[in-house]
Amino acid sequence: MTSTSETGNTNRAPQAASDSASGTVPGRTPHATLRYTAMRLGVFLACFVVVAVLAYVGVLPEAIGKANPLWLLMLAMVVSAPLSLVLLRRQRDEMSVRIAERMDRAKRKLAANQSQED
């Protein structure tokens, strides 16, 4: 029975190590990419609404030819890109750290697998 509990402890230890290696760190969001993407979409939609209202009021031209929706979408993209660059810097940095951690973990796993094959 003692060996079973020791085996259980050794099984738990690698799992705890893999949890810390997986990047589950308190204070960090586990879905940084999803969060950044949702916030980026929110910035774009807000810009689209503002551009559409300004076009409706007459501050901006409503269309170039017959391309009203396309014109408004392109203008919203042009406006939202620099805004998200400035406003979402922290989320983008957090996302890039998470992606870099995943890539490092994948590289270590690949190197370990290659060394086992030799």
Image (tube, rainbow, N blue to C red):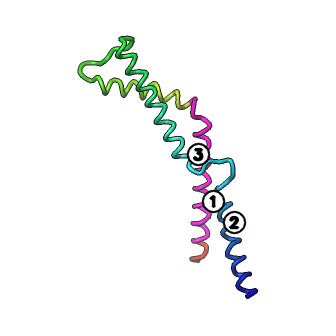
- Which residue has dot 2 on it? 17
Q: Position of residue 48 (x, y in %)?
A: 41, 26
Question: What residue is rendered at 73% in x and 86% in y?
Answer: 3
Question: What residue is rendered at 28% in x and 18% in y?
Answer: 64
Residue type at mark 1 is: Ser
State yes or no: discs 2 and 3 in contact (Cβ < 8 Å).
Answer: no
- Foreground mark, 2 or 3, reads 2
Q: CA distance from mark 1 to mark 3?
A: 15 Å
* Mark before the other along the chain sequence, 1 or 3: 1
- Which residue has dot 3 on it? 96
The magenta stretch is: 86-113
Residue 8 position (above or below residue 1): above
Q: Determine if the magenta segment contains residue 49.
A: no
In the picture, measured across the screen, residue 61 lies left or right of residue 22, that is left
Which type of secondary structure does the marked residue at label 2 adopt? Answer: helix
Image quadrant where one finds the N terminus: bottom right
Residue 15 position (above or below residue 83): below
Which type of secondary structure does the marked residue at label 1 adopt? Answer: loop
Q: Position of residue 42 (x, y in %)?
A: 48, 34
Residue type at mark 2 is: Ala
Q: Position of residue 75 (x, y in %)?
A: 39, 24
Q: Residue furthest right?
A: 2
- Which residue has dot 1 on it? 22
Q: Residues within 10 Å of mark 3 (few under 14, many from 20)?
A: some
